[in-house]
Amino acid sequence: MEARLSRAALVAAVFLSSVAVSFGASHRTENFIVTASSQDLAKAVAETAEEMRRDLAIEWLGHELGPWQDICPITVNAGSHLGAGGATSFMFENGRPFGWTMTIQGSRERILDSVLPHEITHTVFATHFGRPLPRWADEGACTTVEDISERQKQHNMLYEFLTTHRGIAFNEMFAMTEYPSDVLPLYSQGYSLARYFIAQGGKQKFVNYVGDGMKWNNWTRATQQHYGYSSLSELQVTWLDWVRRGSPELPARQTLVSQEQPAAQAQLAEVATEDLRSTTSVAQTASVTRLEAESTSEDRSSTSGGWYSRVRDETIASRNRVEQAAYASDSTAAAGSGEVSTASQTVSRPQPVGRPGQIILEWSRPLVTPPTQAAPASQHRLIPGFRGTLWR
């Protein structure tokens, strides 16, 4: 047995050495060993990774992480001709992540200011939670630490996805534990929603919210308790209005949904209900898919007010002004309308893995959009939305 282990260790050592030689150089720190094309780049990535591991943990969790039992190898493929992207894989055992593997690529600048912080944030969350996060929360939060140039791309793509029938219903998005086939909308929508939540209390509040949502397996309850929305449907309505208004900065201090304004809350609920039941002829725009969120009766209570109560009337008025939105009946949606939408863009994403419990987190920035193809028929009910064209 020991002989077999020794031979296996020797093979692994030879392989790692050959990899290091092929990449040119390596540099090791307490938690990372980096191989890259030059010693300078390997050292820069390794030291930056350690700094980010410390700083991002403090930023999200309020404290540093202890040293990992397993060192995390990082393979760097740098080049100005390469799109920025990365992949991080690991497994969990009794709530502890292990078996780290990270690969990053792109220009040196994008590697250090976007790809590396994105991937390091994945490792911080894995260490803190000890379990996989919902895809929207994990990818959305990790995208918030990228450089503004990359975040702006996500913001721009969000508008494209929302107006080309590629949005994801909230009840589906909150339940996702795997990447969808059309992965890019998940990044853009998850980033936007994570940013929306963070603007209402900061990153540590967001981490607590995600933790409670997973612990309770009840996102309606967690959303109400941490942010004051009585349901995911109500969250959907206000988030869409925020996106429609250009995703503006929100006041620093926010406590949502006032108990002192039951009339406004009832009016908002009435608007949402009417949206679900209304049918009308198609005017100038394509049909809009309903993001329907389930809510439990125990989570209908509210917390004391602030920003949300101040914009509620704005939201209602804004939604009432959407006159060009198209509707379709539930039966039409269930039968499928044969509508055509933009095909999924080609993107590297997690592949099936050989060992149970392994998690692979990967993202990239594709440069070419493939030709369009027919999209699956929608099975969601409809609401008026962003400029009348939202959600597949």
Image (cartoon, rainbow, N blue to C red):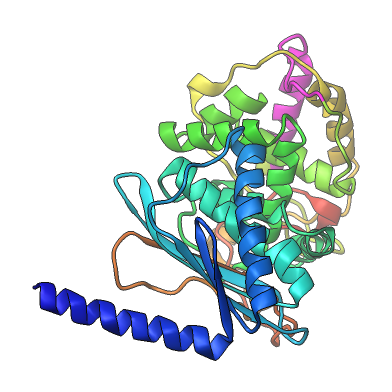
Query: Which corner quadrant of the image does residue 336 belong to?
Result: bottom right
Residue at 45% across, 65% down = 89
Give the tally of numbered discs.
Answer: 0
Asked if the magenta segment contains residue 82, the reply would be no
Nearest the viewer among 385 and 356 is 356
Q: Is residue 115 shown left or right of residue 171?
A: right
Asked if the magenta segment contains residue 274, the reply would be yes
Query: Which corner quadrant of the image does residue 11 belong to?
Result: bottom left
> 203 above or below 33?
above
> 69 above or below 17?
above
Q: Residue furthest top?
A: 260
Q: Is residue 165 visible?
A: no
Image quarter of the C terminus: bottom right
Residue 162: where, in percent of width, then height? 75, 60
Q: Which residues are magenta?
A: 253-275
Residue 24: where, in percent of width, then height? 58, 86
Residue 163: where, in percent of width, then height? 79, 63
Residue at 79% across, 26% down = 308
Q: Is residue 50 visible?
A: yes
Query: Which corner quadrant of the image does residue 257 belong to?
Result: top right
Q: Main secondary structure of the magenta part?
A: helix
Residue at 77% across, 36% down = 199
Nearest the viewer among 239 and 37 is 37
Q: Residue furthest left?
A: 1
Residue at 61% across, 64% down = 46
Q: Is residue 1 shown left or right of residue 212?
A: left
Nearest the viewer among 74 and 192 is 74
